[in-house]
Image (cartoon, rainbow, N blue to C red):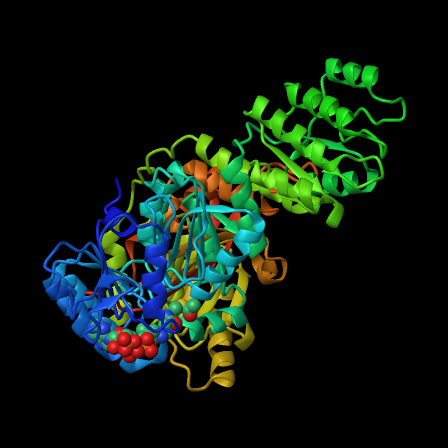
């Protein structure tokens, strides 16, 4: 049982700031609790009243002298800390702070919010909010909020960072006939966050789907850990707003949220089995499907329709969302042929024609559902004069109950004439849509979740040998001592070598003679590159020479590079010139990392070279989830670069194993050293045998040990 049970199923509640005035929030909260048929004692707290709504009223929670699980606080912000302190003294377990005027209004508000939090910590109280609407649980039941109305009882929990979103969805849900188990407004999340609430809803026996609207997630690591467990119990569907840069700014100004990068969210959701909704519609479409239908065994979809056009749209959607059109068995086709009119289309989509009445729907739907090659079914209905939308709705419900292991969705395309049919479907647990695409998209979400549940547990993290952490530590210390934030080429190359990543050998020469000597040792041909912390784009200042075949050529190139750099950037400090071996040909890919504020190191893989930004043929993973060879291979296979690597147009395949090793080791490196803030290995050249890091850029930042 969740440790937040006392919040959703409190024995007794106090309402601090309860009021007689019907215009006040303190009245609405009290009224809601009473109307929700809450079973425990309700203690209104108001120093100026003796009785409100027929209930004895107290000056302070300290006067109640009886156990209180939850206190809902609805007094102005300036009184909130005092009230919280009294609640702590009275042994209250949890606060729901409706009051606004905290972190969202600036520095002073933030200070007051921190004070509230530290009071809660001191007394071991948990706090929802501040700046929230409150919470509702339809099963316990309790409505500790100032929302208008109480949701219909159901099995969906909705957690929302936006109070406005919560009350709007509540209002809309009545029209939609949707039922909920819990409605929770997180507000400023000073203590309880969506992570705690997801964890609690995952353990709630009355909840079977968890929906969440978030603007930011502040503890990315815990989110991934908790959701990875919770999503094995229940589907979690999240709409994360603030994904565009304009949206991110709006999110910041809305609740002071710091929006994390979109790609990191994608990677984190995927890693933890969370489904990401693209819109509000998407969120609730999927919720309806999950809340009412079984998970599909696979992706083979059958469509039964009375109209051609909508069936084509639905078929397109099936392909677009990665599902498959089912191929019926011969028995199914024969049976359909025997009983349907000769003009009907017997192959998927099954077109039972515009004059189809309920009996034809019944026969065709049952026949395809019974086919072993069908995993789920979609019923399309358009209103014609002879159509029987309501009767057909009853048939769909009946068949879905009879064959309850395969999901069925209905698309009733039309308006007024179909309203009743749609409503019957909805109230009888068939997701009913007006257009085909959302129904197929919901199936896609269900299939994605079903596959997540079926996937074998990730194997143990790979044991990587030949890693010299001390060597990297020394290089980083030297870089910090030199007051730099970017590693020089030979330093980056040494970091790679220390982590067992094959890298083009790079040595620093401080004179032309030394450069020639190194060239001799490496074996010609070699390349020379200027080494200066001030020069990022070496080619632009004539700082690179490649394909040098002798010591004579090396010395000449050395002099020329120094001359060029002096000419273009006379003030740039020169540490010397790097001598690098020339690496054999291969497919050029990029392996990189950027550190996300919320989720930590995010590793990128994709097609490399100068096309990276143009083509954006990339895939992402959080380094924390990139510890097995299978996951690295999946990551590689999501890109078009994979097609090249496998051997495109008769070319020999490249060494994907070696590339995987490079990605795995890079992932370990950036996990081991928080000082590495950004990293680009562009390109990694993947040969027929082996893979070599060619150009490595590492950016670092000193880490405060306590940080
Ligand atoms: N203990 C007990 N009762 C108290 C105390 C106290 N320490 N101090 C005041 N009260 C009483 C008051 O006397 C009053 O009762 P009365 O009507 O009998 O006089 C009652 O508590 C409320 O106090 P008021 O000063 O009248 O405050 P008011 O009700 O106007 O506002 C509120 C309080 C609602 C908390 C306000 O400060 C606030 O924050 N409003 C915004 C709430 C909000 O939007 N939250 C975010 C939701 S998310 C979204 O946007 C949808």
Residue plotted at (50% across, 39% down): 291
Q: Is residue 449 above or below residue 73?
A: above
Can residue 449 be seen in this snapshot? yes
Seen in the image, is 460 located left or right of residue 453? Answer: left
Q: Is residue 605 above or below residue 75?
A: above
- Residue furthest right in the image: 343
Rendering coords of residue 511 (x, y %): 38, 71
- State the residue in front, 15 or 274: 15
- Residue furthest front in the image: 54
Rendering coords of residue 390 (x, y %): 70, 36
Seen in the image, is 241 located left or right of residue 36? Answer: right
**Residue 188, image quadrant:** bottom left
Rendering coords of residue 369 (x, y %): 65, 23
The C terminus sits in image quarter: bottom left
Ligand 1 positioned in quadrant: bottom left
The N terminus sits in image quarter: top left
Residue plotted at (51% across, 58% down): 171
């Amino acid at each position: 049982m969740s440790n937040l049970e006392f919040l959703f199923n409190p024995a007794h509640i106090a309402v601090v700031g309860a009021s007689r005035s019907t215009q006040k929030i303190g009245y609405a909260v009290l009224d809601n609790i009473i109307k929700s048929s809450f079973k425990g004692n309700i203690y209104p707290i108001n120093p100026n009243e003796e009785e409100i709504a027929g209930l004895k009223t107290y000056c302070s929670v300290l006067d109640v002298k009886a156990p209180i699980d939850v206190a809902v606080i609805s007094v102005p912000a300036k009184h909130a800390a005092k009230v919280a302190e009294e609640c702590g003294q009275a042994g209250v377990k949890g606060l729901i702070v409706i009051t606004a005027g905290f972190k969202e209004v600036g520095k002073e508000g933030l200070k007051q919010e921190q004070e509230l939090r530290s009071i809660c910590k001191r007394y071991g109280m948990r706090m929802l909010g501040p700046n929230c609407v409150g919470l509702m649980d339809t099963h316990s039941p309790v409505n500790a909020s100032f929302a208008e109305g109480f949701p219909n009882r159901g099995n969906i929990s909705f957690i929302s960072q936006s109070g406005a979103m919560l009350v709007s969805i509540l209002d809309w849900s009545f029209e939609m006939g949707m039922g909920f188990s819990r409605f929770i407004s997180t507000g400023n999340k000073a203590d309880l966050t969506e992570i705690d609430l997801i964890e609690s809803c995952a353990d709630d026996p009355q909840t079977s789907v968890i929906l969440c609207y978030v603007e930011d997630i502040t503890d990315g690591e815990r989110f991934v850990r908790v959701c990875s467990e919770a999503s094995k119990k229940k589907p979690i569907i999240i709409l994360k707003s603030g994904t565009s840069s304009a949206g991110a700014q709006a999110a910041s100004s809305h609740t002071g949220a710091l929006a994390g990068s979109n790609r990191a969210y994608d990677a984190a959701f995927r890693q933890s089995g969370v489904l990401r909704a693209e819109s509000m519609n998407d969120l609730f479409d999927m919720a309806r499907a999950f809340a009412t239908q079984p998970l599909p065994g696979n992706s083979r979809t059958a469509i039964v329709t009375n109209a051609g056009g909508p069936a084509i749209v639905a078929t397109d959607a099936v392909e677009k969302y990665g599902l498959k059109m089912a191929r019926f068995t011969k028995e199914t086709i024969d049976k359909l042929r025997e009983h349907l009119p000769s003009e009907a289309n017997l192959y998927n989509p099954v077109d039972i024609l515009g004059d189809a009445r309920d009996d034809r729907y019944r026969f065709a739907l049952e026949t395809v559902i019974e086919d072993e090659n069908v995993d789920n079914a979609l019923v399309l209905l358009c209103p014609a004069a002879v159509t029987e939308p309501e009767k057909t709705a009853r048939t769909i419900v009946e068949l879905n109950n009879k064959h309850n292991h395969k999901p069925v969705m209905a698309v009733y395309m039309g308006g007024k004439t179909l309203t009743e049919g749609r409503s019957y479907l909805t109230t009888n647990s068939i997701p009913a849509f007006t257009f085909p695409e959302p129904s197929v998209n919901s199936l896609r979400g269900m299939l994605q979740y079903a596959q997540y549940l079926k996937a074998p547990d990730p194997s143990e993290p790979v044991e990587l040998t030949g890693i010299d952490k001390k060597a990297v530590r020394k290089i980083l210390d030297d870089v910090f001592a030199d007051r730099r934030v970017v590693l020089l080429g030979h330093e980056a190359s040494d970091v790679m070598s220390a982590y067992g990543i094959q890298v083009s050998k790079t040595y620093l020469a401080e004179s032309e003679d030394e450069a020639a000597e190194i060239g001799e040792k490496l074996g010609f041909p070699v390349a020379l590159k200027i080494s200066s912390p001030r020069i990022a784009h070496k080619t632009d200042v004539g700082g690179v020479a490649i394909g040098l075949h002798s010591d004579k050529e090396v010395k000449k190139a050395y002099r020329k590079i120094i001359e060029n750099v002096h000419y273009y950037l006379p003030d740039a400090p020169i540490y010397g010139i790097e001598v690098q071996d020339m690496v054999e040909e291969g497919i050029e890919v990029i392996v990189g990392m950027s550190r996300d504020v919320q989720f930590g190191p995010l590793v990128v893989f994709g097609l490399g070279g100068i096309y990276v930004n143009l083509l954006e043929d990339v895939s992402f993973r959080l380094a924390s989830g990139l510890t097995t060879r299978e996951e690295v291979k999946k990551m590689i296979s999501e890109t078009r670069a994979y097609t090249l690597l496998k051997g495109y147009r008769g070319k020999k395949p490249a060494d994907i194993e070696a590339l995987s090793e490079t990605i795995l080791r890079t992932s370990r490196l950036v996990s081991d050293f928080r000082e590495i803030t950004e990293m680009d290995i562009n390109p990694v050249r993947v040969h027929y045998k082996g893979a070599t890091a060619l150009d490595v850029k590492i950016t670092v930042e000193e880490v405060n040990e306590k940080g």
